[in-house]
Amino acid sequence: MPVLRKSRFVSGFILVILLGCQRNIAHSTSVAEPASDPTTTITDIHIAPVVIRSEVKRFGINIAGQSFYDSGQMLRNLVASNPGFEGETWQSILRCATASSVRCTEANQWNQWPADFLKGATFEFLSGPSVGSTGTITQQDAANPNLKDDGISLHFDRLNTAPLPGDFVVVRKTIPGKAEAGWWPSVWAGGTIATETKDLAPNTPGKQALRLTAEIPGQSAGVNAYFDSLAGHSFVQLRGVYHVAFRAKGLGGNNRINVAVHRDSNGQTESMLNKQVSLSNRWQDYTLDFTANEHDTIGTAALGFSVGGGSVLLDDVSLTPARTSSNSTAFRDEVVETLRELRPGVLRYQDGDHLGSSIDNLIAPVAGRQRAGWSERTAEQGGIPIGLPEFLALCQAVGADPWFNMPSAITPQETRNLIEYLSGPAGTPYGAKRAAAGQVQPWTEVFSTIHLELGNEEWNGPIFAGTAMPDPVIYGSRARLIFQAARSVPFYPSNKFDLVIGTFADIPDWTTKELSHSGAYDSTAVAPYLFNHFNDDSSNEAIFAPMFAEPERLDSVASGSMYQQANVAAHAARPAKLSVYEVNLGTADGTASQESVNRAVPSVAGGITVIEHMLLMLRDLGVSTQSIWALPGFQNGFANTTGKPEHETSPLFGAVVDMGGTTNRRRPVYLAEKLANASILANMLETKLTGANPTWQQKKSQNDQVQLDRVHALQTFAFSEGASRTLIVVNLSRTGTQPITISGEAPTGPVKVSVLTSEHIDDTNETSNKVAIKEMTLPSFHAQTPYELAPFSMTVFSWTGR
């Protein structure tokens, strides 16, 4: 059972301990960890004028994808799933378990595609003796969930060379129709909803519109877009002026459409807009304004269109707040403000909705963008992806370099088009597309580096079935082909792009095989998640000691997987920079109770652990480009391996609770990254610890099997840029303060001190703001007067050097 929490502070003295203090060590009452030098309790941190890492970047974050229910509601258009009522494209990568010249059968018996879902699709083999062979699928058999490894079968129209088992094939199909996808349709008494492909608005960028028909008395037809729908929570509070914009045309009857915006809260419907709009018999643009003033309102919200007594065409819908001068992006003000406060060095775009897309679709106008499916878990893609233009504009607005995950099935020609879009003059075909969207200047002139990764977790076949290529040799070869295509473009500035090949963090040998069969890359990237398996919640020490120890075990000792990954990257035939595309706690299964998961995962200790991991990878391994997963995401599933209860959750992976909802609270991992980014400067300096330099022995834990003989309780990271200096000190003691002195390039005079900690090691910000960054300025800092570091804390000293 989890232990009861006990305050470590005496009432009335909390602020002093939180911020730390300088004092005479003779009056110490702290309990030190086992010390390297038992004759002293003080650790001296010596900052040497030696640069160990240069051109250091601030840490980044993933923006993930748009949702309609939690903190993933990032776009200004709150009904962004399919605003243009467009059709669908499909692009999936499959692996043949058995193969012949006329047929390929894959092994995923859980594939959800019905028979002939892919009939008429094109195919292209990506590997094996049939590589480059193309044709049409004449028949597709459904998978058999009752027979192991009996997945779908593809039948080919022609194939001169037979593929082999293990070869990969990409299938592509355009699926027009179903304009109501991404909306919730409703018909009554014979009303109908249909897709219109001929009578379209003159200015629409799309190929479809929605037809609503309910001309007979008593009939009705309509669609609703629901949002902010997670039970018991609100992530978007409607305040101020909003615009509902749409295109419509009356086709007969009363030529009217009802437009409504409402929220169902506490058993009541709160209406914000409810208006009958008379339509012209020609296509016309309409805008309806309303003012909302929600405060702590919880319940599902909706925008609805309905017809009764007539027939209409509807297209290109948006529900947006009034534009503010400080934000010209497609993202909500609160999202942009949250990112500007965080100051990320890089933003990574990995939106699951984009993995099946083409580059042309990703740069298309929003109202003309098609839904793009890829997953074997579904036969319909409900939402459109966030577009590349919107993402790049967001990066520019918040001062971050972009990291874009190219769809894994991207072709060499698409790759060349993408490079031209990003770096070509406005007179080139794809440079002209960029300019037409409002960006005349090449994006390579806006950003210092554009990171382009091929696919997302290509090693992770079970999760990304339909887009993964879980074979390091074949994926490495494919990456070489795509990256060579990128480099062949005349407008490719090699100093502006970082071509990234993703790999499996836990298996360095996977990286070895990938890199040895690849080429033309710049970096390899991993996702070294922490605290994945949570089994021992018997005490705070059982939870947080191994949590704190795991980063050092992975990053700083020769047996650690990240230590080995860095070695593989550095010694490849073509050496690669090592990057981190995702990192966070990954607590997804175990025997821990829901109560323990809720207090451990989003805790102040959890936030400090993640940022210590990132700082260690920077200091000890030279990993400069790193991104937390992710900005949004209220909760994820937790698989309790005891089977009881069946439905636990884990408060992952979002760095915030909400942005513009009822709380605007930041989780400790956000606060830790914010504090780190405020402290990271261009150069990292060498630090050496002498004196106590306490350690502890981490015996083998049932949480991630963490074991390490000497875990350092203090970790230090110093930075310089011009005359500016910072020192980050992390105290990993669960119970004791740690006295330190600073020597060498030590601070003098006024020093700003910023501290992230809290009263209890498992404090969170889930229900109230318990964890915060505290700041103070010490006007006369004396580096050799011992300074007390609070337990489980991250302390930053900032000053102007000599």
Image (cartoon, rainbow, N blue to C red):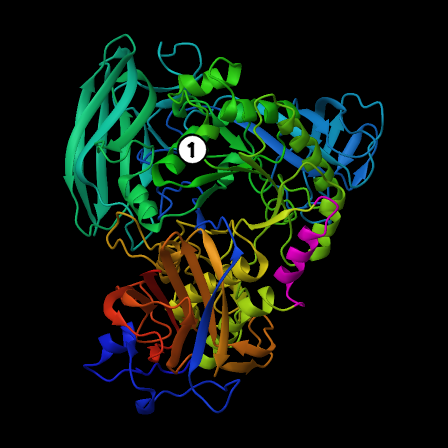
Instruction: Give the camera-side residue of 8 and 83.
Output: 8
Depicted 334 relative to depicted 373: above or below: below
Instruction: Give the camera-side residue of 57 and 202.
Output: 57
The residue pinned by badge 1 equals 392
Query: Whole-percent x and y of residue 304?
Result: 28, 31
Which quarter of the rendering shows the C terminus?
bottom left
Q: Would you say 324 lies left or right of 519 here? A: left
Per the rendered image, the range of residues in magenta is 558-574
Depicted 655 relative to depicted 686: above or below: above
Query: Whole-percent x and y of residue 92?
Result: 63, 34
Which quarter of the rendering shows the N terminus?
bottom left
Q: Dot 1: few (<14), some (14–19), or many (≥20) neighbours within 10 Å?
A: many
Q: Residue furthest front?
A: 802
User: Is residue 572 magenta-colored?
Assistant: yes
Q: Residue at x 46, y 34 (%)?
A: 382
Visible residue check, residue 252? yes
Query: Whole-percent x and y of residue 169?
Result: 71, 33
Depicted 473 relative to depicted 195: above or below: below
Q: Residue at x 41, y 16 (%)?
A: 436
Q: Residue at x 45, y 29 (%)?
A: 445
